[in-house]
Image: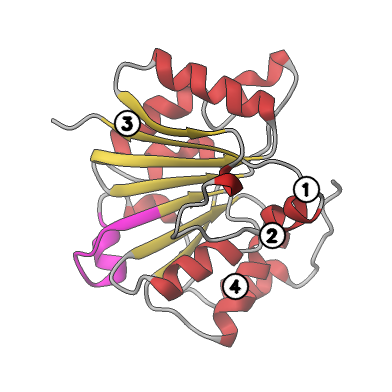
Amino acid sequence: MRLRNVKYAKELLESYPNTVIQNPKKWAGKWKEIFGNDNPIELEIGCGKGKFIYEKAQNNKEINFIGVEKFDSVIVRALEKVMIEPLENLKLLRFDALEISEVFKDNEIQNIYLNFSDPWPKKRQAKRRLTSPTFLNSYLKILKPNGRIYLKTDNYGLFEYSMMMLNENDNFVIEDIMLDMYKNLPEDNVQTEFEIRFRELDKPIFYIRARLKGE
């Protein structure tokens, strides 16, 4: 899918520094200061246009949420939602997920959401998948003990790969797997833009919930 350039994106994002946090690396280990409280922090990597993370923040005011997206022209759509109805418990960050261990320190994050991530289907692209060993090793550092990873995807290849990588990593325990999550939909499920589209096409949504082992 070709990314449409939004000409005003960079300027608009920089105009809302209280929501779109600039230079996120300097806040590593200090995200509670950004939110001004000790509430748990949950993270969506690849938040896209922000429907999921915005609704999670709306519905769970006692939890802080951070949406991460690489592209200005995408995350600006998430910001536009916040502009209509500001949420104090939601922040947006622009950076490449490869840098995640530089943006968050040990045990800062309660849960991580990976919603319809790029499957990078070619074998040589495997290291780019958000459940590759490199990424999982970053997650186990930033997650709190017993913190969780939630994955939703329409791509069976990514689903299968993610199961394998999590099973091979002794630090994680897979708690739940669904080949079609809409046959037993979690009560607190929040749909993403892609999820709505795939449901309209009657495509199954694959689901994994994994937990980082406690201390």
Amino acid at the residue labelled 1: Asp
Which mark sits nearer the N-terminus, 4 or 1? Answer: 4
Residue on which disc 3 sits: 140
Q: Identify the disc placed on residue 50.
A: none
Which mark sits nearer the N-terminus, 4 or 3? Answer: 4
Q: Nearer the viewer, mark 2 or mark 3?
A: 2
Amino acid at the residue labelled 2: Glu
Which mark sits nearer the N-terminus, 3 or 1? Answer: 3
Tell me whether circle 1 and circle 2 mark residues in contact (CB < 8 Å): no
**Colouring method of the image:** secondary structure
Residue on which disc 4 sits: 79
Q: Residues within 10 Å of mark 2 (few under 14, many from 20)?
A: some
Residue on which disc 2 sits: 193
Residue on which disc 1 sits: 202
Q: Residues within 10 Å of mark 3 (few under 14, many from 20)?
A: many
Q: Which residues are magenta?
A: 30-42
Q: Position of residue 80 (x, y in %)?
A: 64, 77
**Residue 20 appears in view:** no
Tell me whether circle 4 and circle 3 mark residues in contact (CB < 8 Å): no
Q: Residues within 10 Å of mark 1 (few under 14, many from 20)?
A: few
Asked whether residue 153 is drawn in magenta, I would say no
Which mark sits nearer the N-terminus, 2 or 3? Answer: 3
Relative to the observer, which residue lies in front, 108 or 101?
A: 108
How far apart are labels 4 and 1 at the CA level?
Answer: 30 Å
Relative to residue 44, is residue 123 drawn left or right? right
Q: In the picture, residue 119 is in which quadrant?
A: top right
Amino acid at the residue labelled 4: Leu
Q: Nearer the viewer, mark 4 or mark 1?
A: 1
Q: Residue furthest left?
A: 215
Tell me the element at label 2: helix
Residue at 70% of width from left, 33% of height from top?
155
